[in-house]
């Protein structure tokens, strides 16, 4: 702790100056809040939920698995990832906060959209053209995030580049079963990449182990 000594002149006696030295004044350092890194949690929220959905899109699982995906999309992929985004913004990470909050809101919106479409298809029919444009818009948004990752690391570059491809294939998947099927495999790879990145960053923070794809890059 830094200390300041304060001297007070208490009198004059000829040529002699009497000085009383006060006790040291302790100056308390103002520390920032101690916070953990919400990045691995946000990546797991995204990756795990994406892989769950792609079990259906790749046809590895029955469509009756969809209610399970609904639940995790709402709470883990949606709410959980949104919380991670807010924490990243508080921490000062603009990119991480914007991305996590965006995809967290995406999953919550996706859950509500699919729930309404499945529970009352007569009232909420599928708008094929609209959903195609919607997926295309998210592909465009993701590409914007991908540009930023060119100065981040290989893990994030892999996640966002494959997510652009996944959204693009999902846009075509509304008109072609083959495109939707291909989107399932790309999406699963994207989700698995996010899970890998989560543990890669976690191991670096907790264990000091640097796995491939974690080191910073600067391609632009």
Image (tube, rainbow, N blue to C red):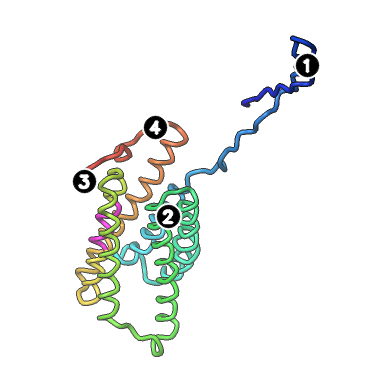
N-terminal-most mark, 2 or 3: 2
Is 189 situated above or below 218? below
Residue 126 in percent (x, y) is at 32, 83
Mark toward the viewer: 4 or 3 = 3
- Residue 65's tag is none
Per the rendered image, the range of residues in magenta is 159-166
Q: Say whether marks 3 and 1 touch (CB < 8 Å).
A: no
Binning the other alpha carbons within 10 Å of mark 3 as few (below 14), some (14 to 19) or many (20 upward) gives few
Question: Disc 2 to disc 3, how far (Cα)?
Answer: 22 Å
**Label 1 sits on residue:** 12
Picture quarter with the N terminus:
top right
Q: Say whether marks 2 and 4 touch (CB < 8 Å).
A: no
Q: Nearer the viewer, residue 45 or 27?
A: 27
Residue at 43% from the left image edge and 40% from the top image edge: 202
Binning the other alpha carbons within 10 Å of mark 2 as few (below 14), some (14 to 19) or many (20 upward) gives many
**Label 4 sits on residue:** 209
Residue 121 in percent (x, y) is at 39, 86
Residue 162 counted in the magenta span: yes
Residue 176 counted in the magenta span: no
Q: Say whether marks 4 and 3 touch (CB < 8 Å).
A: no
Question: Disc 1 to disc 4, how far (Cα)?
Answer: 67 Å
Mark toward the viewer: 2 or 1 = 1
Residue at 41% from the left image edge and 70% from the top image edge: 66
N-terminal-most mark, 1 or 4: 1
**Label 3 sits on residue:** 220
Secondary-structure class at tag 2? helix
């Amino acid at each position: 702790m830094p200390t300041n000594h304060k001297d007070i002149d208490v009198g004059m006696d000829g040529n002699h100056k009497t000085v009383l030295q006060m006790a040291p004044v302790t100056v308390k350092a103002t520390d920032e809040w101690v916070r953990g890194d919400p990045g691995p949690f946000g990546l797991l929220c995204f990756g795990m939920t994406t892989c769950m959905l792609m079990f259906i899109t790749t046809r590895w699982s029955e469509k009756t698995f969809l209610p399970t995906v609904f639940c995790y999309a709402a709470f883990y992929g949606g709410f959980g990832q949104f919380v991670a985004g807010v924490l990243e913004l508080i921490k000062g990470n603009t990119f991480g906060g914007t991305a996590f909050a965006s995809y967290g809101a995406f999953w919550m919106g996706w859950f509500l959209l699919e729930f309404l479409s499945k529970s009352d298809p007569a009232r909420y029919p599928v708008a094929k053209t609209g959903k195609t444009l919607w997926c295309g818009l998210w592909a465009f948004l993701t590409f914007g995030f991908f540009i930023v990752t060119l100065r981040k690391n290989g893990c994030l570059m892999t996640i966002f580049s494959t997510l652009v491809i996944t959204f693009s294939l999902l846009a075509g998947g509304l008109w072609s079963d083959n495109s939707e099927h291909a989107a399932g495999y790309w999406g699963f790879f994207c989700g698995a990449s996010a899970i890998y990145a989560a543990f890669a960053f976690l191991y670096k923070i907790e264990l000091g182990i640097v796995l491939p794809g974690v080191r910073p890059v600067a391609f632009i």
